[in-house]
Image (cartoon, rainbow, N blue to C red):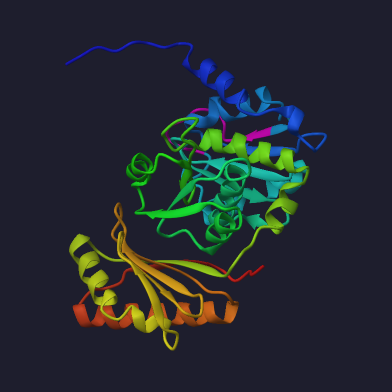
Amino acid sequence: MGSYVLEPSALEAYINDAALRVDPSEWRRGDPPRLVVDCANGAASIVTPKLLRKAGLGNVVTVNCNLDGMFPGRLPEPRPDVLQSLTPVLDATNAEAMMAHDGDADRLALVVRGLGFIKQDLVIALLAERALRDHKGTVIVSVDVGYEVEEVVEKNGGRLVRAPLGRLHEYLASNPDALMAAEPWKYIEPRWGPWPDGIYQALVVADEVMVRGQKFGEVFTKMPSYPSMRLSFVVPGPEERERLFKGMLADLEGVLRPAKVVSRLDIDGLRLQADDGSWVLLRQSGTEYKVRVYGQALTPARLVELLKGVKELASRAASSVNVKILGLEEAYDLASR
């Protein structure tokens, strides 16, 4: 059908080129932080530790960095519940942060000593602030990204464009002034390459901490943060997923009452924003038999109201469309800064 070429120097070329993207002379911090790098035994195992060391961030402790496609160390998805069991490593090694990848290394998650798992909106907000420091342009984010990024982009004179999950590339093509694109866990810097790159993201985040002359905990404590939630209602199959989605869609607006809906975005499910600053997004998972709901509020009390309203809506809708909900996966953060 075709041909292939072996490129034995590709890994070395990638590491060398990426390392040149940071300038240690701009670092305001002295000694680099001690970092735990967890590659889930995946593709990043032979790249991220070498890249960080090459760039001058050599105080690295590796975990699950021997290549093994059976992922013996942990589940490959770097979710908060998956990484929780590894947080004692931070104390044991006196490390500031853990950088964790998934199997194919297009994702990056952060766990910071003293703060725990860092909400992805805060990571994206940090990257957006960095992108807009010297240049003004467009920041593309997925429809589920929250206020933190919106606030940072507006404050720094950028323009925010929302895209459906999984379609960042299309929006990059139609926004040639885009400085970056991101969705939770995934980051694209067009000047580096048109692909989501968790390895490069690890380098950029570490470099940004060094440029600011702060510790990881200080950097993320100073970022704006608002109460947020992510819920997934698990159903038996694709037909049930469709029925539950439509059933919940019929009265999604009711979750926000007594606040009034002031904007609607339907590029990926339906996102409603209310006049009190709260918002909810309802969408179907593109890969699993789940209906997902995302939301945010300006106060913890209001978020608790949204959580209750969403669960009640799902229960009513499931009953009306004859769908059995097999399980509920929920994660929420009531912190507000």
Q: Residue at (49%, 75%) from the top-left corner?
A: 278
Residue 251 sits inside the magenta stretch: no
In this rendering, would 17 be left or right of 286? right
Decide: is 56 above or below 80.
above
Q: In x, y percent, where is residue 167?
A: 33, 47
Decide if residue 122 is on the left or right side of residue 311. Answer: right
In this picture, is 73 found above or below 325? above
In which quadrant will I find the C terminus? bottom right
The residue at the point 38 percent across, 72 percent down is 263
Magenta highlight: main SS: loop
Q: Position of residue 307 (x, y in %)?
A: 46, 77
Which of the 4 quarters of the picture holds residue 92?
A: top right
Residue under the point 42% across and 54% down: 161
Judging depth in this view, the residue of 79 and 56 nearest the camera is 56
What residue range appears in magenta?
A: 61-72
Quadrant of image for the N terminus: top left
Determine which quarter of the picture holds residue 133: top right
On the image, the x and y values in percent for residue 238 come to: 21, 60
Q: How many marks?
A: 0
- Pick the front one: 136 or 251: 136
